[in-house]
Image (tube, rainbow, N blue to C red):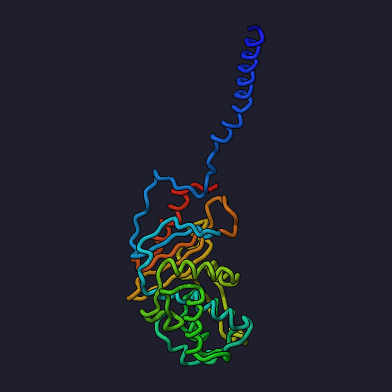
Amino acid sequence: MVLLLIGVAWGLYAVGKNEEKNEQPIQANIIQKTPEIFPMRNWSIDEPEILAKSAILIYSNQKDNILFQRDTSQILPIASLTKIMTAIIVLENYNPEEIIKVSAQSVKVNGDTGGLIADEELTVKNLLYIMLIESSNDAAMALATDNPRMSYNEFITLMNSKAKELGLENTSFIDPAGLSPENKSNVAEMAKLTKYALDFPIILDILKTPQSSIYSTDRKFIHNLTSTNKLLGKIPQLIGGKTGFTDEAGGCMITISNIYGERVKSNNYLITVVLDSDQREGDTEKLINWAQEAWLWK
């Protein structure tokens, strides 16, 4: 009997020790902290009210988080946002220091002009500055028409081929300036094109330039440029952007901006695209400011 009681007591003691031994690992497996993922939406702040027919705001990093979207699949005229693709084709096919002689045909193009003069000579780089800062149609035409490397039709073919290469299935180009309402895309694809354009440092350098003075190669002619982007210098975190307008397209705008306070890596940007807006600058400013307030950044 004594031996039996001792055996029972020892068994109970062993069970108790095993339970005590296993208690902590079991709890550790059950209680795990969920990692926080940034940016995080602050749902107490409503989405901004904008006038654009279509718009998108993305946080351009490895995942390209969409922070705001409105009718992103609509295919609309893109006006002078076209010139982003024109600049890409130029930089992938020309030497920036090449010299182009501007033709009378290019000077006569309709719409916004950079005041180019027939037979003046400018470097490719300077024509890019004129085209992207003042949204010059004559500079766009000179780059596509007056270059020694390809014909006008070949240039347009390259623009459309590049769109297909980048997976921009709803994007098409008829001219290098954006005059045709058949130059079309949607905001999602224009954001993707903008991200690709940022691989060319000179494009970003030009898009963030508020003013510049450009000379012809013989320095006989000077072109004093002022950016069509009225938000430059107004919004602290804005890096740069490109505007567009035609009667058919309405107001269009692309911008690249930093996160307020530089709380994320410097090579990650906010990209906004608005198409067909009566207040392109107002809509864009609302989206950029909203991104700082309605999202929490690590």
Residue 19: x and y in percent read: 60, 24
* Total residue callouts: 0
Placement of 80 over or under 293, stated as above or below: below
Placement of 3 over or under 186, stated as above or below: above
Residue 77: x and y in percent read: 37, 74
Residue at (34% x, 71% y) in the render: 250
Residue at (45% x, 76% y) in the render: 82
12 or 169, which is in the foreground? 12
127 or 223, which is in the foreground? 127
Using the rendered view, name the quadrant where residue 245 is placed: bottom left
79 or 17, which is in the foreground? 17
217 or 171, which is in the foreground? 171
Using the rendered view, name the quadrant where residue 208 is placed: bottom right
Residue 117: x and y in percent read: 51, 88
Residue at (55% x, 37% y) in the render: 32
Quadrant of the drawing holding the N terminus: top right
Residue 136: x and y in percent read: 47, 79
Query: Is residue 62 toward the left or the right of residue 291 in the image?
Result: right
Residue most extreme to the top = 2
Residue at (65% x, 15% y) in the render: 10
Placement of 24 over or under 250, stated as above or below: above
Query: Is residue 226 toward the left or the right of residue 219 in the image?
Result: left
